[in-house]
Image (cartoon, helix red, strand yellow):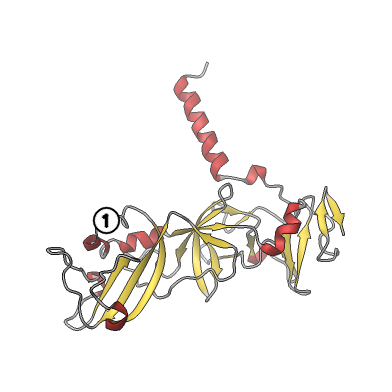
Amino acid sequence: MSSPISYLLATLLSLFFNFHGSKANFPASPNCPITQCSTDGLEFHYPFWKMEDSTADHYCGYPGFGINCSDSGGPILGLPNNDSFYVRDMDFTLSTITLVDTDVVHQTCPRATHSMSVGALPFDYSPTDVNLSFYFNCTSFPHPFPNPILVPPIICWGTSSTNRSYVFKKGEEPDEYDWSENCAENVVVTVKETEEITRSINELSGAFGAAMNKGFVLNWTRAKECGACEINGGFCGYNNTAREVLCFCKDGHGSIDTPSNGLCKNGGWIA
């Protein structure tokens, strides 16, 4: 008979894999496969799709959800404004994806180069996210607030007697200082609210790099153009040649030659 400890361990492992993995619950088909960028890499599937596996004229997944594979085998998602992010994790139960900016990976003192946007893609920011606001090349410096706490510049980028840069949780900048007037650039980046972010304001300037390397979380929602297809049991796709939405049946049949307004239901198509 198994010991209570063994039973508890088995139960916890079962919960872990049921929570994080959806491979057993996803009805893969030739049109909508379960895939990965490397043999031991992160598995993913609909509504995401592997760009190099898609044919020249169609794919199964949401527009804008194509995953590229880096030379080292890492999955990369492109967002609007030509921004690229490594996919650190996906949870198909909670519909969440964790992303890390490719420009900051493995850097202890990354320089935030751009604010992020999801554009019209069906993503929402997670409640676990917060925004960091960077102010670069400030030519005059904020006064101490409140005494004796100082406003610390970002030391790892170097400081000078004429230009300094700062980082705050967005909305926690000192009101007594005109940041837009005195600083050359403001960049806002999203990160998870980790231990590094909850530190006091005079510690954040040395902890933001670790927070940026842990990334941020997006929740995906149903794409508007895919609602009717999914409600009727299908998987949404897109025909690049005809520039129209497709609806793939779960059994993989009747997908390509059917008009774009056809709906998949009970393993077949309805007009």
Q: Quadrant of the C terminus?
A: bottom right
Q: Residues within 10 Å of mark 1 (few under 14, many from 20)?
A: few
Q: Nearer the viewer, residue 71 or 60?
A: 60
Badge count: 1
Left/right placement of residue 217 relative to residue 110 reads right
- Horizontal side of 262 relative to 183 (left or right) equals right
Q: Position of residue 95 (x, y in %)?
A: 57, 52
Foreground pick, 187 / 73:
187
Residue 33 shows up from this direction: yes
Say what amino acid the circle numbered 1 marks: Arg
Q: Which residue is mark 1?
A: 199
Residue 86 location (% of width, % of height): 49, 63
Looking at the image, is 137 positioned above or below residue 97?
A: below
Q: Residue at x 23, y 73 (%)?
A: 176
Q: x, y (%) of residue 119?
A: 55, 71
Please tell me whether residue 92 is drawn above or below residue 59 in the rendered image.
above
- Snapshot quadrant of residue 215: bottom left
